[in-house]
């Protein structure tokens, strides 16, 4: 929904696909601030990169106090079912590459 001040308010956003599930919601507060929060599960990392293993669970929130104001953004992510590997061996992102 486009607000009178030009900002865009997303009340709900849901998406799913090969290894992805995303749910998010937004709101406008009584004083005009915008809030947006959601969570996503990436359960098939091999779809993003061949040879990748494991999954990622992520949550985020964002808020803007007024039109033209800065957005405050926070995120938290955690991995699941990651292989026990050192950066120099074949790990979750596929074949090893030189370590910088």
Image: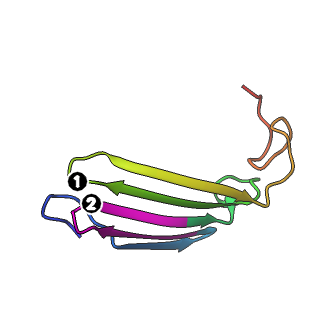
Q: How far apart are marks 1 and 2 (CA)?
A: 5 Å
Across and down, in percent, residue 49 comes to: 67, 52
**Label 1: few (<14), some or many (≥20) within 10 Å?**
some
Tag on residue 85?
A: none
Across and down, in percent, residue 13 comes to: 41, 71
Residue bounds of the magenta highlight: 21-39
- Residue closest to the eye, 60 or 47: 60
Residue depicted at 39% across the width and 63% down the height: 36
| In this picture, residue 39 sits left or right of residue 13 | right
Residue depicted at 79% across the width and 61% down the height: 81
Q: Name the residue under label 2.
A: 33
Q: Does the magenta stretch include residue 50?
A: no
Q: Which of marks 1 and 2 is nearer the N terminus?
A: 2
- Residue closest to the eye, 18 or 74: 74
Across and down, in percent, residue 53 comes to: 77, 57
In this rendering, the answer to whether 11 lies above or below 90 is below
**Label 2: few (<14), some or many (≥20) within 10 Å?**
some
Q: For the C terminus, which image quadrant?
A: top right
Tag on residue 66?
A: 1
> Please, which residue is most extreme toward the front here?
31
| In this picture, residue 54 sits left or right of residue 60 | right
**Image quadrant in which you'd find residue 3:** bottom left
| In this picture, residue 32 sits left or right of residue 53 | left
């Amino acid at each position: 929904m486009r607000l009178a001040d030009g900002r865009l308010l997303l009340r709900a956003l849901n998406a799913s696909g090969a290894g992805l599930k995303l749910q998010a919601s937004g709101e406008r507060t009584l004083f005009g601030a915008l809030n947006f929060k959601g969570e996503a599960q990436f359960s098939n990392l091999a779809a993003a990169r061949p040879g990748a293993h494991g999954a990622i669970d992520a949550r985020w929130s964002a808020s803007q106090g007024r039109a033209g104001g800065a957005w405050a953004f926070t995120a938290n992510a955690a991995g699941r079912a990651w292989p026990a590997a050192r950066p120099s061996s074949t790990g979750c992102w596929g074949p090893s590459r030189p370590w910088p």
